[in-house]
Image: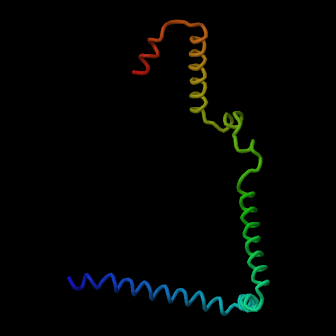
Amino acid sequence: ADHRQREPGVREAVRRRRRLVLNKMSHDMLLRNKAWRIIVNASKRSPTFFVAFTGAVAAGSYYVASLTQGGTNPSDKKALFISDEKLKRNAGLHAQVLAKANKERLRVLLEEARDNKGDNTRYKAALK
């Protein structure tokens, strides 16, 4: 029972050590980069540089995101919808036969509704 109580604390300590090692590694990698050191030192000396650098990074991020979105999404609203002709060209024989059958059924239904032929027993039976 005592072993189970200590186990979560041990796990947490191991996790904490791993996080520190990973943080130290990324921190060390940044410190080795000369450009990053120049940016950090300039930011410490000049709040204006810090604000300008922050704005440049934000603007650059926005620009890259806009380019990505523009490249992956069509800007033309009509391009979002696939035309019937294109669907018919790309459809297989099975889909074409089903489409033709559905159009015929719809035509019959509309004709019956327009001419008031028959009663609604056929539709009531279909709904059951």
The answer to whether 109 is drawn above or below residue 61 in the figure is above
Q: Which residue is drawn at the image coordinates 61% and 17% (left, top)?
A: 107
Q: Quadrant of residue 43?
A: bottom right
The way the protein has been coloured in the rendering is rainbow
Q: Residue furthest left?
A: 1
Q: Is residue 91 left or right of residue 69?
A: left
Answer above or below: position of 88 versus 125. Answer: below
Image quarter of residue 60:
bottom right
The quadrant in which the C terminus is found is top left
Please state if 110 lies on the left or on the right of 65 as rendered.
left
- Image quadrant for the N terminus? bottom left
Direction from residue 28 to residue 57 in the image, left or right = right
**In the image: residue 92, left or right of residue 47:** left
Could you say where residue 24 lies in the image, as x and y percent from the top left? 55, 90
* Residue 11 versus residue 88 in the image, above or below: below
Q: Position of residue 10 (x, y in %)?
A: 34, 86
**Could you tell me residue 104's position as x and y percent?**
59, 19
Please report the residue visible at 75 percent of the width from the left and 83 percent of the height from the top: 50
Q: Tag count in the figure? A: 0
User: 59 and 65: which one is in front?
Assistant: 59
Using the rendered view, name the quadrant where residue 69 is placed: bottom right
Task: Return the residue nearer the eye: 114 or 1.
Answer: 1
Residue sitting farthest toward the front: 47
Report the residue at 71% width, 34% height from top.
85
